[in-house]
Amino acid sequence: MSLWIGIIVALVVSLVSTPIAIKIAHKLGAVDLPNARKVHKEAIPRMGGIAIYLGFIFGAVALGFIDTKVIYLLIAASVIMGMGLIDDVKGLDPKTKLIIEVVAALILIKGGFYVKFVTNPFDGGVISLGMLCIPVSVLWLVGICNAVNLVDGLDGLSAGISAIAALTISIVCFAQGEIIASSLAAVLAASAFGFLRYNFHPARTFMGDCGSLFLGFMLGALSIMGLSKGATTVSIFIPFVIMGIPIFDTFFAIIRRTFLHKPVFEADKGHLHHRLLALGFSHRQAVLAMYGISLFLGASAVLMAILTTPQAMILLIVVAVLTITGADRIGVLRGSRQEHLLGKKSEKPQV
């Protein structure tokens, strides 16, 4: 019963507080202006993440699972939210943001959120990480945090795929008996769905960095909390499948920019949502297509959690092949032909 109360509270708080966040953003001048890389044509308030955060906080309290570990989670999440708000209003340089993200990750680790071991995919045994558990956990949390931020490029995109990922984590955790992690993930999904009412195309507000970084951080934290205790060979891959779109989109961006001889951290228009738009998809169609991919990956992760290890490994291989093939065909992996030709032209010596 407390689970449904938490979900309803999170949904209602997110719905009610989003219009308030819109007004605050306008007063503070926290608006997202259009430019060559963005698809919106007018200034949009970008502090909607406040509503997602408040929905989660109130929903988590309504669950009644507030213990020391959850308190650490809420503190770390609040650090990320605070940093995101400052960045949305005044702007922060990447180095400062990275330092704060690492601090938030270390707070979580202090509260017991870390990966103690990974399973060996070759023999099914367990590999203890020892002292490496700290850097591995920090890398995972910071990586997912920024991966979700990178896919926040279309109305409703980041909120929708994060909600689907959170819902998937909730189902898998419930199947594995991790009730607290499952409940918190369900509350996070409800908060994102509530915000989506105002964020789906045409969006009245964006979540901003405070929202995308918060969602990414929470997804990374909850996956550690509920999915890092499995001892089966395939368990190590389940979080990667659940967070497939932000992880693979970021990974493919690195490959693409390397292939095109561009700086790895240089922004481009080769992300999945950019490529779908270039192929003729409308704004809504591109977002719905990515929702479909997220649902496919989520369903695959749920099946992997309940199938036998050999069956799960076969499914994982199928998902990996489909993902890489699809990414290459639409230009996410190596960029469009035009980008490739431009990359070749830039290699010629200037005279």
Image (spheres, rainbow, N blue to C red):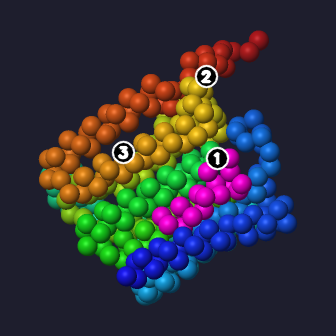
At horizontal 16% and vertical 46% (from top left) the residue drawn is 311
Furthest-top residue in view?
351
At horizontal 61% and vertical 22% (from top left) the residue drawn is 339
Assess whether mark 3 and mark 1 are in contact (beta carbons under 8 angstroms): no
Residue 119 coordinates in the image, percent (x, y):
24, 58
Q: Is residue 196 above or below residue 151?
A: below
Residue 59 coordinates in the image, percent (x, y):
51, 78
Quadrant position of the C terminus in the picture: top right
Regarding mark 1 in the picture, which secondary structure is present there?
loop
Q: Amino acid at mark 2?
A: Glu
Regarding mark 3 in the picture, which secondary structure is present there?
helix
C-alpha gap between disc 1 and disc 3? 22 Å
Camera-side residue of 149 and 14? 14
Q: Callout 1: few (<14), some (14-19), or many (20+) C-alpha neighbours within 10 Å?
A: some
Q: Callout 3: few (<14), some (14-19), or many (20+) C-alpha neighbours within 10 Å?
A: some
Q: Which residue is mark 2?
A: 339
Q: Which label's residue is closer to the chain start, 1 or 3?
A: 1
Asked whether residue 45 is in view, the answer is yes
Q: Amino acid at mark 1?
A: His
Which label was assigned to residue 201?
1
Residues rendered magenta in the picture: 189-206
Assess whether mark 2 and mark 1 are in contact (beta carbons under 8 angstroms): no
Q: Which residue is mark 3?
A: 296
Q: Amino acid at mark 3?
A: Phe
Q: Is residue 215 above or below residue 335?
A: below
